[in-house]
Image (tube, grey):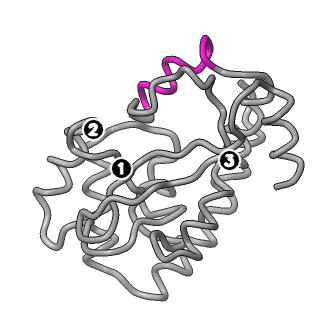
Amino acid sequence: MLLALILVKLGSPGPILFKQNRMGLHETTFVIYKFRTMKVTANPHLSAMEMKNHYETEAPRFSRFLRKTRIDELPQLWNILKGDMSFIGPRPDLSPEFEPDIYNERKKYTPSPYEVRPGLSGLAQVKMRCQHDTSLKAKYDAEYVKNYSLWQDIKIFFATIPMLLKVIFKKD
């Protein structure tokens, strides 16, 4: 994390951490932390897909490395320690104002993905890898909640490791 802190600071002027409001347990809002991989002037309300589209023009030096290796997500360990997130669960989304598609898709399911803490990794991330199909993501998030168990979390945790390695070592 110290190396990431240095890379962000060398990459561009501005704060080291990016803070953004996300939806958590019972649809409450919390501040998520990441290492900043966008210029300070970038819109903080962009969805993941919109950020990907702006990435080339808005990214400081070293950002590509931090994102590809998922090192930019490490400050979320603080969110886990605070109790906003867990290691495994549906990824937290922006408020419905900024990301209505995923919110509306998740609300179709009972139990709702908002009935558990959001996670650093989840069933959708393991099953979908880097796809951005909102309805499929919501389906996997709901499936996770429906089958919520320690055993499922352990399986997702260990499935995350090879998935992450494939993403890191994939040729661009």
Mark number for residue 99? 2
Residue placed at 45% from the left, 70% from the top? Answer: 84
Q: Residue at x 25, y 56 (%)?
A: 139
Judging by the rendered image, the residue that carries numbered circle 1 is 93
Magenta residues span 49-58
Q: List x then y, in percent, for residue 110.
A: 12, 70
Q: Dot 3 corresponds to which residue? A: 70
Q: Is residue 16 magenta?
A: no
The quadrant holding residue 141 is bottom left
Q: What amino acid is labelled 2 in the image?
A: Glu
**Real-space CA distance between mark 3 and mark 2, rounded to the nearest whole angstrom:** 22 Å
Bin the neighbour count of mark 2 within 10 Å (Cα to Cα): few under 14, some 14-19, many 20 and up.
Answer: some
| Mark 3 or 1, nearer chain start | 3
**Label 1 is placed on what type of residue?**
Asp
* Residue that sits furthest to the bottom in the current view: 150
Q: Position of residue 91 (x, y in %)?
A: 42, 57
Which element type, helix, strand or loop, lies under badge 1? Answer: loop
Number of the front mark, 3 or 2: 2
Using a 10 Å C-alpha cutoff, classify the residue at mark 3 as few (fewer than 14 neighbours), some (14 to 19) or many (20 or more).
some
Left or right: where does residue 94 sit relative to residue 167?
left
Residues at marks 2 and 1 touching, judged by CB atoms closer than 8 Å: yes
**Number of the front mark, 3 or 1:** 1
At 68% from the left and 47% from the top, the residue drawn is: 70
Q: Point out the tag, 3 or 2, that comes first from the N-terminus.
A: 3
Q: What secondary structure is marked by label 2? A: loop
- 154 shown above or below 49: below
Quarter of the image where one finds residue 17? top right
Q: Is residue 132 above or below residue 146?
A: above
Mark 1 Cα shell of 10 Å, populated few (<14), some (14-19), many (≥20): many
Residue placed most toward the observer, 38 or 133: 38
